[in-house]
Image: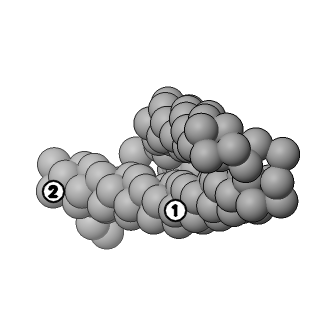
Amino acid sequence: MNNYPTFTTPERRNVSMQDARLQANDELGSLYERALQNIQTSVADSQTQAAEQAAARGMGSSGLSQDAMNKIAIAGVSQRGNLEAERTQKVASLARQLMERDQDLGFRERQQAFQE
């Protein structure tokens, strides 16, 4: 009988989707927090400017002033929603890339171990 050694794959823990998603969130979190702060600052600045313009024109207590403020608030909510949707999409994409990279690494490690 042949006494060939049996091949056993090296032990390694694959990255789970949850781990990949957490890692992607960590990488992108500060970026999106800063973008959210920029949106909030922009909305606050726009509301201040709208109030100042309305007061300068003598419309500080008119419905037009409040209408402008409402439009600015709605635009801010829309921007935050778009930012959150973009963040979710990028986190999913990055998590998928991390998992694929980990799988490729596992395949290469097994192939190298088999060749040795």
Please tell me which residue is depicted at 47% across the width and 60% down the height of the picture.
90
Say whether residue 28 is left or right of residue 43. left
72 versus 1 height, above or below: above
Looking at the picture, tell me which residue is in the foreground, 24 or 102: 24
Give the answer, above or below, for where 102 lies relative to 40: below
**Which one is nearer the viewer's eye here, 41 or 82?**
41
Q: How many marks?
A: 2
**Image-quadrant location for residue 87:** bottom right
Q: Residue furthest front?
A: 58
Q: Amino acid at mark 2?
A: Gln
Residue at x 84%, y 45% (from the top left corner): 61
Within-10-Å neighbours for mark 1: few <14, some 14–19, many 20+: few
Q: Nearer the viewer, mark 1 or mark 2?
A: 1
Residue where numbered disc 2 is placed: 115
Residue 19 visible from this viewpoint: no
Q: CA distance from mark 1 to mark 2?
A: 43 Å
Horizontally, residue 72 falls left or right of residue 5, namely right
**Left or right of 90 in this view: 68:** right
| Image coordinates for residue 18, horizontal then vertical, percent | 66, 50
Q: Nearer the viewer, residue 105 or 51?
A: 51
User: What residue is at 58 percent from the left and 64 percent from the top?
Assistant: 82
Quarter of the N terminus within the rendering: bottom left
Q: Which mark is residue 86?
A: 1
Q: Are marks 1 and 2 in contact (CB under 8 Å)?
A: no
Q: Nearer the viewer, residue 11 or 55?
A: 55
Q: Residue at x 82, y 54 (%)?
A: 62
| Number of residues whose C-alpha sits closer than 10 Å to that of mark 2, classed few (under 14), some (14–19) or many (20 or more) | few
Q: Amino acid at mark 1?
A: Glu
Extreme left residue here?
115
